[in-house]
Amino acid sequence: MKYFMDESFPAWRGFQGIRIVGDVHGEAGDFKAAIDDARTIGFFIVQIGDLVDRGPDSVGALRLALDLRERGAGLFLRANHDDKLRRALHGNPVKIGAELRRTLDALEAVPDRAELLPRVRDALERAPWWLRIGDYLLVHGAFHPAMLTSSGPEAVAPRRLADKCRWLAIYGEGRRDNAESDLPTRTYRWIDTVPLGITVVIGHDVRATDRIVEQRGALGGRVLFCDTGAGTR
């Protein structure tokens, strides 16, 4: 969790600062505690993505995120777990594992699903791929320098670079070492492309469960890893 102030980000005007909340993964109780604390001190919230799956209450986490967005008190970024849910809710072909199945079943079981599901679909569709706030670049998975000058992939050219930025934003950087594994080995060459004076804030990868981890790249740029393992403890 991190907070800062920046005059260049219009959404938070009227708030005392911005608080960043890392991956939630269905831990609605902890997410609510972070929201309540931010509200007490008048902070806008940017949640870094991965609201759902793993933890006990993905529906509750989604409701909290929707409430933040609809009140103008916060927003959340696109991330791999949430984007897979988005595609599933639109009826696109996706591989539905046990975690996503639990989330989908929980959404289907709520009494207000006819009202809730369109709100969820719309919010997931509108979630930013990344967010530039002054000298900070907030993104779920990994950074590319093109993100510093573009508000989203639709503003990136050529298309091949736009597609690369989409992939990095929600999946991060990686390579496949094991053909039998569904998960790539994560790599971090992109850290050395972060310019001096820029701080990139990501989730997606648990570097520690008790603190935010900082790393510097070859150009002097700073990266903060904010995923502290919600939903896995």
Image (cartoon, grey):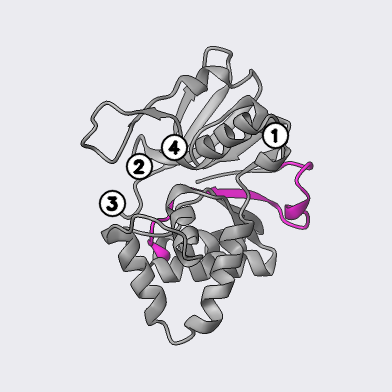
Query: Tag 1: residue type?
Result: Val
Is residue 216 depicted above or below 199 in this figure? above
In three-dimensional space, the C-alpha distance between marks 4 and 3, rounded to whole angstroms, equals 17 Å
Q: Nearer the viewer, residue 22 or 54?
A: 54
Mark 2, mark 1: which one is toward the viewer?
Answer: 1
**Percent coordinates x, y for residue 233 in the rendering:** 26, 52
From the image, tell me which residue sits under label 3: 232
Q: Which residues are magenta?
A: 6-28
Q: Which residue is mark 1?
A: 156
Q: Tell me the SS state at disc 1.
A: loop
Relative to 123, does residue 19 appear above or below in the rendering? above
Is 97 situated left or right of 50 in this image?
left
Q: Which residue is identified by label 4?
A: 212
Determine crowd level at label 2: few under 14, some 14-19, many 20+ residues with C-alpha closer than 10 A.
few
The amino acid type of the residue labelled 4 equals Ile
Camera sees residue 230: yes
Measured as percent of width and height from the top left, residue 61 is found at 45, 65
Q: Where residue 70 sits in the image (x, y, percent)?
A: 66, 69
What residue is disc 2 on? Answer: 210
Q: Earlier in the sequence, mark 2 or mark 1?
A: 1
Location of residue 158 with respect to 24 vertically, above or below: above
